[in-house]
Amino acid sequence: MGFIGPDVLLMDPAYIHDSALLYGKISIGPESSIWPYVVMRCEMYEIQIGKRTNIQDFAMIHVGKDSATIIGDNCSITHHCTIHGAKIGNNCLIGINSTLMDGVVIGNNCIIGGHTIVKENTVIPDNSIVVGTPGKVIRTMDNSIANKGNADFYYENALNYRNGIFRSKW
């Protein structure tokens, strides 16, 4: 059911679900995971997924009209997110059903709250918590430890799935 195109570079990811659809110039970093029904597509530019980053169920990642999509290390792109031509720093969590539009730049250690829409060309500084439509910074704090912890959890879960273990023992 899934598809991994000939231009996709897999750099030892932890897990890619069989239903994932990956088209165009895409690189998936080491220890990263791609979960059920993820769609990544780029007819121009490229999509880069960093190390130990998880792209969760039903996420859609595409390039922008004038921009690649780059996602850093230790990030969690949660269920039903749309990332469209945006750049996301390291140790970020993008909340459920959020949308990042063309030209958005998210700094390191950020949290984008669920259902947030970050408008075109918005720049979010490091250590920000962003919510709303349109997304606005509501607080500044270093979220790196919690966000990396979430990425670590998904890495461990990915290893279990790769080995046919679908229920954790935690």
Image: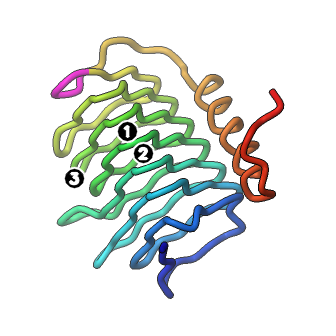
Q: In what element is the residue under mark 2?
A: strand
Please name the amino acid that badge 3 sits on. Asp
Question: For this rendering, which residue is in front, 49 or 39?
Answer: 39
Mark 3: few/some/many CA within 10 Å (<14, 14-19, 20+): many
Residue with the mark numbered 2: 88
Is residue 13 rendered magenta in the image?
no
* Residue 105, quarter of picture: top left
- Quarter of the image that includes the C terminus: top right
Horizontal side of residue 150 vs 117, given as left or right: right
Which residue is located at x 55 percent, y 57 percent?
34
Q: Earlier in the sequence, mark 2 or mark 1?
A: 2
Q: Position of residue 130 (x, y in %)?
A: 33, 23
Question: Badges 2 and 1: C-beta atoms under 8 Å apart?
Answer: yes
Residue with the mark numbered 1: 106
**Which span is picked out in magenta?**
132-136
Residue farthest toward the bottom in the current orientation of the protein: 6
Q: In what element is the residue under mark 1?
A: strand
Is residue 135 rendered magenta in the image?
yes
Which residue is located at x 39 percent, y 71 percent?
46
Mark 1: few/some/many CA within 10 Å (<14, 14-19, 20+): many
Which residue is located at x 23 percent, y 62 percent?
64
Cα distance, mark 3 to mark 1? 12 Å
Cα distance, mark 3 to mark 2? 12 Å
Question: For this rendering, which residue is in front, 110 or 10?
Answer: 10
Horizontal side of residue 165 vs 54, given as left or right: right
Labelled disc at residue 102: 3
Please name the amino acid that badge 1 sits on. Ile
